[in-house]
Amino acid sequence: MLVELAVKEFLNKVAGSDPVPGGGSIAALNGAIASALAAMVANLTIGKKGYEPHEELMRHISEVALRQKELFVADIDRDSEAYDGVFACFKMPKATDEEKAARSAAIQEATKHAALVPMQVARNAYELMTILMDVARLGNRNAVTDACVAMMSARSAVLGALMNVRINLGSLKDKEFVDRLQREADELERLACAREKELLDEINQELKV
């Protein structure tokens, strides 16, 4: 499993000549990093003087962020497995009309799955961005830049995952499926970019000297 590799081993594998792990797995990794940072800032707020009114919220955020981290970690491998699934279908026999039809149908189904995996990553990463607004605004001020890095990582997770959704949609024949995911992808991208900008503008203003 990719997630069992040491950081250096994982990066060396990414840098290699194999197509996986690729951008989809890295998008999920960005989501995991964002979740871990969200939990860190929340935990640095819990028990600190002056933050008592937000302690219960920060405990909740820490729990949610840690659950999301595990989902993103699983998605690092799920994305690579989805790609491998599509690639395996292309190796199916195509000597007869029946084999060609079966191969084509299998490719379509595997490609749909390969689009849905990153779409879920994008959805989860955008949900995390909502949590990060509270983390950055109400959490420990000494860790506010960590919350902002988490927000940037979450936005990268959304946009990176959506790129992988779109590249798979391009080879699908199910127009209704394609249109539905394309509309959702466009809206998620718009919302994610707006949310990141809102927070970074706010915190950069706060940090001006």
Image: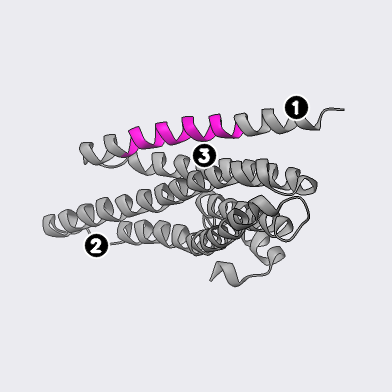
SS for tag 2? Answer: loop
Corner quadrant of residue 201: top right
* Left or right, residue 122 beside residue 133: left
**Which residue shows up at 37% across the image and 44% down it?**
168
Closer to us: mark 3 or mark 2? 3
> Alpha-carbon neighbours of circle 2 within 10 Å: few (<14), some, or many (≥20)?
few
User: Is residue 123 one of those drawn in magenta?
Assistant: no
Question: Up-down: is 185 above or below 89?
Answer: above
Residue at the far right in the pictured view: 209
Which amino acid, by three-letter code, is at mark 3?
Answer: Leu
As drawn, the label of residue 52 is none
Closer to us: mark 2 or mark 1? 1
Contact, mark 2 vs mark 1 (Cβ under 8 Å): no
* Left or right, residue 170 beside residue 40: left
Q: Say which residue label 3 marks.
A: 159
Q: Say which residue label 2 marks.
A: 93
From the viewer's side, name the closer residue of 194 and 29.
Answer: 194
Q: Say which residue label 1 marks.
A: 205
> Alpha-carbon neighbours of circle 1 within 10 Å: few (<14), some, or many (≥20)?
few
Q: Tell which circle, 3 or 2, labels the residue nearer the N-terminal end.
A: 2
Percent from the top left, x then y, of residue 187?
41, 32
Percent from the top left, x then y, of residue 21?
54, 58
CA separation, marks 1 and 3?
25 Å
Q: Tell which circle, 1 or 3, labels the residue nearer the N-terminal end.
A: 3
Percent from the top left, x then y, of residue 33?
63, 55
SS for tag 1? Answer: helix
